[in-house]
Image: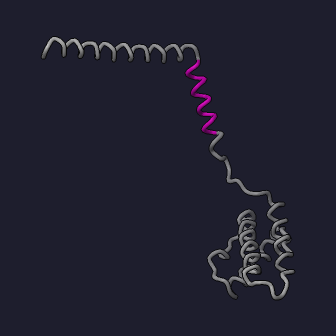
Amino acid sequence: MSPLTSAVLYLALLTAAMAASFALLGLLVRAFSGQLASDLRARRRARERDLPLAPVHRPVEAVAADLRRLSRQLDVVPAGSPQVRRRGFQAAYDDVLVEAAGQFGVATTLRGLPPGFARDVERLRLETALADAGLAVR
């Protein structure tokens, strides 16, 4: 190994050792001054604040109001209007109905059923179950 290479290697090791000692010194200063504990508490509070403690739902009053509004809109769809309009209202009503069922703990298979008689029967059963649970839909 040449003397120049040895000198460069020695300087590199010396620089690394000095950087490590300065980092350790900074950490010790933060620990003894209380800044390290304060930073850790702030990080923990930020993590706790970002995590939802409970599932977030819309208020039951808003869900009930949407159900009543969509129910009225379904009842007054004029004859001769496009079928897409009625299906859209029905799909929106079904989505809010399933949301209400989730909030009241009523089991439902409405989302998995294809349009037709079985879905209509499940919709009626769900409306009745929600009414029994205390939510007047219509």
Residue 115: where, in percent of width, then height?
67, 83
Most frequent secondary structure within the magenta stretch: helix
Stretch of the chain drawn in magenta:
35-48
Q: Using residue 115 as the reference point, say whether residue 35 is left or right of it.
A: left
| Rendered position, 38 above or below 15 | below
Q: Nearer the viewer, residue 80 or 38?
A: 80
Res. 44 image quadrant:
top right
Residue 102: where, in percent of width, then height?
71, 65
| Residue at x 18%, y 13% (from the top left corner) | 4
Q: Nearer the viewer, residue 22 or 120?
A: 22
Task: Inspect the magenta stretch and tell me whether residue 94 lies in it.
Answer: no
| Residue at x 57%, y 27% (from the top left corner) | 40
Residue 18: where, in percent of width, then height?
37, 13
- Which residue is the extreme one toward the left? 1
| Residue at x 54%, y 13% (from the top left corner) | 32
Task: Inspect the magenta stretch and tell me whether residue 39 lies in it.
Answer: yes
Q: Using residue 37 as the reference point, say whether residue 1 is left or right of it.
A: left
Res. 8 image quadrant:
top left
Q: Using residue 126 as the reference point, say whether residue 43 is left or right of it.
A: left
